[in-house]
Amino acid sequence: MKAYDDANIMETTVDSKRVFDGLILHIDHITNRLPNGKLAAREIARHVGASAVVPVDGEGNVWLVKQFRAPIDQILLEVPAGKLDYKGEDRLEAAKRELAEETGLQAASWTHLSDIVTTPGFSDECISLYLARELSAGQSHPDEDEFLNVIKVPMAELVSMIARGKVTDSKTICAVLLAEKVVNG
């Protein structure tokens, strides 16, 4: 692969203004100087970040949640996940919390798979992806506005569902495909 000097594509922020403070998102309007010297307006959705977990039991099943997602008016099949409680929260601790809250599961073995930026065209959201193994059952305690069905699917079947377009949540697709490589070598 040819090496490029990225200085010729870099933008520099010259102004930033918070225009909206929401419950989950904050919106900033920024002005950037382009490599050609011109100015360009950008709108950025600021997000505190999140963690997501692929819990795999001893039989090779992945524990998932089904939940309604209002922005797309659909029920999605997803790995357990949730936003950080505050900027700078330990992402592994957030993953452990979300796994317990949503499924009641705890794990003795944790592997960091990757960090992904979900929609860099307009948002700075970063989700840390983890594989959780050596699972033990407990009692779930979802947030009071969170209604979930917990199901388990064999890893091979889940990978096939992803390939057939039956799973559309991007964090779930990334996390499961990365976890499958670790689990199956």
Image (cartoon, rainbow, N blue to C red):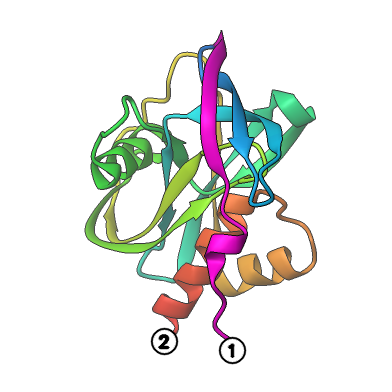
Label disc, if present, on residue 33 of the rendered structure: none
The three-letter amino acid code for the residue at tag 1 is Met
Relative placement, left or right, of 38 versus 29 is right
| Residue in the image at 30% along x and 46% along y | 137
| Residue in the image at 54% along x and 72% along y | 5
Taking the image as drawn, is residue 112 in sight?
Answer: yes
The three-letter amino acid code for the residue at tag 2 is Gly
Figure check: 64 above or below 175: above
Which SS class for mark 1? loop
Q: Quadrant of the N terminus?
A: bottom right
User: Which of the 4 image quadrants contains residue 10?
Assistant: bottom right
Relative placement, left or right, of 17 versus 143 is right
Is residue 127 rendered magenta in the image? no
Label 1 close to label 2 by CB (< 8 Å): no
Percent of width and height locating residue 147 = 56, 24
Q: Which residue is mark 1?
A: 1
**Region of the chain picked out in magenta, as a range:** 1-21
Graded by Cα atoms within 10 Å as few (under 14), some (14 to 19) or many (20 or more), the crowding at tag 1 reads few
Figure check: 64 above or below 124: below
Percent of width and height locating residue 143 = 43, 20
Is residue 16 rendered magenta in the image? yes
Graded by Cα atoms within 10 Å as few (under 14), some (14 to 19) or many (20 or more), the crowding at tag 2 reads few
**Residue with the most extreme left position:** 108
Percent of width and height locating residue 48 = 42, 30
Closest to the observer, 114 or 108: 114
**Residue with the most extreme front position:** 37
Relative placement, left or right, of 80 versus 131 is right
Figure check: 152 above or below 68: below
Closest to the observer, 35 or 163: 35
Q: Which residue is mark 2?
A: 185
| Residue in the image at 46% along x and 41% along y | 81
